[in-house]
Amino acid sequence: MAQQVFKITDATQVKMISIGDGVSVIKSMTIANIHSGDATVSLFLANSTDNYYIFKDLVLPTGQTLKMESDEVSFDNRTYNLFIKLAGSTPVDVIIN
C-alpha cells in the first residue's frame, strides 16, 4: 500500500480507505493533533449495515500523536471501509503506511 496522508479539519466523517481499495496490510497509522486545543477523534470500520469502532471519542491532547501498529488497525478491506471523524473542528493529520 502506498502511503496516504489526510488533513482532517471538521466534524464531517472522512472515508480514508474504501471497500475494495486492495489494502491488504496497514503497516502503521499515526494521528497527530496539530492544533492548540485537545482533539476528540473516532476511528471506525463500516459496512452497509454497521459501524465497528477501533476507538470512539478518544481525546488526543494538544501536540500529541497516536501511533498504531498493523495489529491494531489492519482489517478486511473486502468487507469494511475505514473512517475517521472528529467531534469538533480541532484539526488532525493522519498518515497511513
Image (cartoon, grey):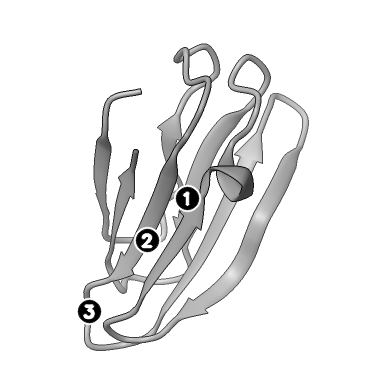
Task: Tell which of 38 and 67 is nearer to you.
Answer: 67
**Distance from Cα at disc 1 to Cα at disc 2:** 10 Å
**Distance from Cα at disc 3 to Cα at disc 1:** 17 Å
Which disc number belongs to residue 25? none
Residue found 64% across the figure and 61% down from its top: 55
As helix, strand or loop, the secondary structure at mark 2 comes to strand
Disc 3: which residue:
35
- Residue 60, position in %: x, y? 44, 78
Residue found 46% across the figure and 48% down from its top: 13
Nearer-N-terminus badge (1/2):
2
Is mark 1 in CB contact (under 8 Å) with mark 2? yes
Disc 1: which residue:
84
Nearer-N-terminus badge (3/1):
3
As helix, strand or loop, the secondary structure at mark 3 comes to loop
| Three-letter code for the amino acid on which mark 3 is drawn | His
Q: Residues within 10 Å of mark 2 (few under 14, many from 20)?
A: many
Which disc number belongs to residue 31? 2
As helix, strand or loop, the secondary structure at mark 1 comes to strand
- Residue 49, position in %: x, y? 77, 29
**Left or right of 9, for residue 79:** right
Tell me which corner region of the image, top left, top right, bottom left or bottom right, holds residue 32.
bottom left
- Residue 11, position in %: x, y? 41, 60
Residue 87 in the image: above or below residue 36: above
Is mark 3 in CB contact (under 8 Å) with mark 2? no
| Three-letter code for the amino acid on which mark 1 is drawn | Ile
Residue found 24% across the figure and 42% down from its top: 5
